[in-house]
Image (cartoon, grey):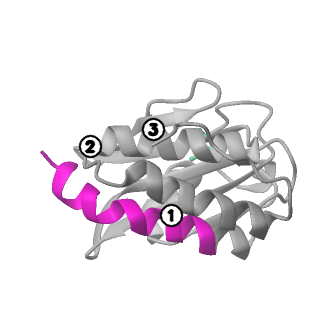
Amino acid sequence: MAEDLLINQGSKEEKYLSIIPQIKGLLKGESDIIANLANISAALKEQFGWLWVGFYLLKNDELVLGPFQGPVACTRIRKGRGVCGTSWEQLKTMIVPDVEKFPGHIACSSLSKSEIVIPILSAGIFLGVLDVDSELLNDFDEVDERFLKEILEIVEETMQTEIHK
Ligand code: SME
């Protein structure tokens, strides 16, 4: 397939509706988890222009930095620490409208103002998180949660078999 993305300039919903089929195309026939998470990060970064988008993956009871796009980030996060570690502990999506008001937020970049973290679960097993940071306050809502979860569903089956090797 062609590797050029079509970038949509419409509403948030229109952007997701445009990029999701393209992500499905990128992942089709590819089972390598790192390749797939890398391309998802790149596609989302290119479409939305967020500050940081990427994955932390569970390894030996820590979240370890995985494929991402954006500024360099902290490499390891423990359970209950920061937004990512809280999402892991509570196994729920965290939408943080103002990161400075989130106790324990781990500031990888001073430019980050708001954040969404979604746990990746496959057959009830926690595998890691998808983390997105924005330079804008209050940039994420339930629309992002719904569509990002849809994107995660595309990779979950692959991750379950690949990630704990
Ligand atoms: N802010 C996150 C840490 C990861 S960086 O944002 C990429 C947190 O508090 O868990």
Query: At x 58% / y 33%, what residue is drawn?
Result: 69
**Image quadrant in which you'd find residue 95:** bottom right
Does the CB distance between marks 3 and 2 fall below 8 Å?
Answer: no
Mark before the other along the chain sequence, 1 or 2: 2
Query: At x 40% / y 64%, what residue is drawn?
Result: 154
Residue 112 position within the rendered picture, expressed as x and y whole percent measured from the top left: 76, 39
Quadrant, the N terminus: top left
Q: Is residue 87 above or below residue 6?
A: below
Give the Cα separation between the discs numbered 1 and 2.
Answer: 16 Å
Give the number of the disc on residue 151.
1
User: For the residue labelled by badge 3, is the local secondary structure a helix, a strand or a loop?
Assistant: helix
Identify the amino acid type marked 3. Ala
Give the number of the disc on residue 38.
3
Identify the amino acid type marked 1. Ile
The residue pinned by badge 2 equals 32
Disc 2 CB within 8 Å of nearest ligand 1 atom: no
**Image quadrant in which you'd find residue 35:** top left
Where does ligand 1 appear, by image quarter?
top right
Mark before the other along the chain sequence, 1 or 3: 3
Identify the amino acid type marked 2. Asp
User: Of 128 and 99, which appears nearest the observer?
Assistant: 128
Considering every residue shown, the one lying at the far front of the view is 1
